Image: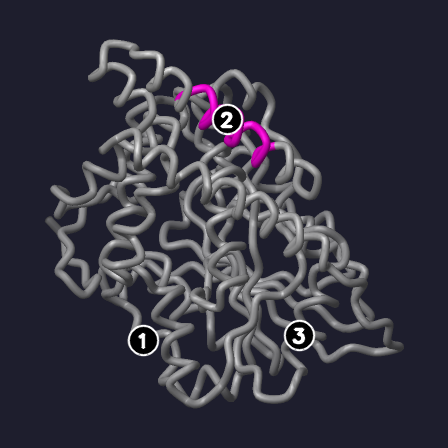
Amino acid sequence: MFLVLALAGSAYLLLAGEATRRFLRAKQAPVIRRQGPPVTLLKPLHGDEPQLEAALSSFLGQDYPGEVQMVLGVHDPSDPAAAVAERVRARHPDREVILVIAARRAGANGKVSNLIHMAPHARHEVIVVSDSDIEAPPGYLASLVAALEAPGVGLVTCPYHGVGRAGFWSRLAAMDLTYRFLPSLSVGLALGLAKPSMGSTLALRRGTLARIGGFEGLADTLADDYALGAAVRGLGLETRTAPVLVAHGCAERSLSEVVAHELRWARTIRGIDPAGFAGSALTHPVAWALLGAVLTQASPVSLAVLAFTAACRLWMMRRVEGCAPPVPGAALLFPLRDVLSLAVFMASFFVGVVDWRGERFRLDDRGGMAGS
């Protein structure tokens, strides 16, 4: 059974490698315009993450012909991220940068609580929400605005790859994003099965946000980015994935941090799409092949399947690296990475409590969250 899963997963790897190449190669230059609509960037913060200042500055150094306002938010005035925000403001005197400090929690989801307090300070019609650990290329805003202006589009998101910023374990976490998540997303988009709305980017108009009731309805939801996209689609509008790739900075410094972070992701996805999540078992073929080889005592057939699966995995990785920055050491680490991914996948079926930035939350079947 494990060897059959490995072979099926190998076929998936071939499909995923080609789908990723086609998706990322389809990136087009943004529309050149003399003046773009003004944009407000909302960036909820928590803690001084590695290279946070550089990540925030990448959003202010855009090749965008329009006014850009950035609203940053923290809950605690002593949060180290507040000092980073002040440095960013000083480095970019030509941009409007606002820091909002609001201690009152508006729900279990701290990120959404931040957004609720930040939203009244947004001055512009186009609003772009993104996680604090995202770094954007110079043409990011121009691509988003071009996609958002297409008829019938209500929300624009974008794909991301991983960058390890805190040593070995962060590189292992980055591998999961670059070599598993990104290809899976590409396959879903190619087959018309995915309608993503990801924390890497959520761009929408102020009027659209008002029509879905603002951020308040997401205050106790773990998958707030997905729920926001679903609410926009509920208005009869399209959610679109823009052809621009951003970097997700990974800051995990230990195995326990990697597992806690990925278990939260896995448990979130399982709550959103149980059938699709179960089907993602095919994305771990090397681990299945290793299990098959162990259980058959390294029979010639199992070793042949393992070699073929590993070759398919390396081919897919090289395909992705033709369009996205590689993770250092990935060619040697992929067996460990695949075994860890399968372990997280299996564990997610038995987890009801997740850890998010040091806080523990109990989840219900619909992705609602409450303190554990």
Kind of residue at badge 1: Glu
- Seen as rendered, the residue at the extreme right is 34
Residue 117, placed above or below residue 357:
below
Residue 329 in picture, x, y percent from top left? 57, 19
Q: Which mark is residue 147?
A: 3
Relative to 321, is 362 on the left or the right? left
Task: Estimate how packed mark 3 is, as few (under 14), some (14 to 19) or many (20 or more) residues with alpha carbons within 10 Å.
Answer: many
| Tag of residue 216 | 1
Q: Residue at x 47, y 77 (%)?
A: 120
**What crowding class fits label 2: few (fewer than 14 Cα within 10 Å), some (14-19), or many (20 or more)?**
many
The mark tally for this picture is 3
Q: Quadrant of the N terminus?
A: top left
Name which residue lies at 53% across and 47% down.
15
Report which quarter residue 228 is drawn in.
bottom left
Q: Position of residue 365 (x, y in %)?
A: 14, 61
Q: Which mark is residue 171?
A: 2
Q: Which range of residues does the magenta coloring cover?
A: 306-317
Looking at the image, residue 292 sits to the left or right of residue 125; the answer is left
C-alpha span from label 1 to label 3: 26 Å
In the picture, residue 222 is in which quadrant?
bottom left
Q: Main secondary structure of the magenta part?
A: helix
The three-letter amino acid code for the residue at tag 3 is Ala
Q: Nearer the viewer, mark 1 or mark 2?
A: 2
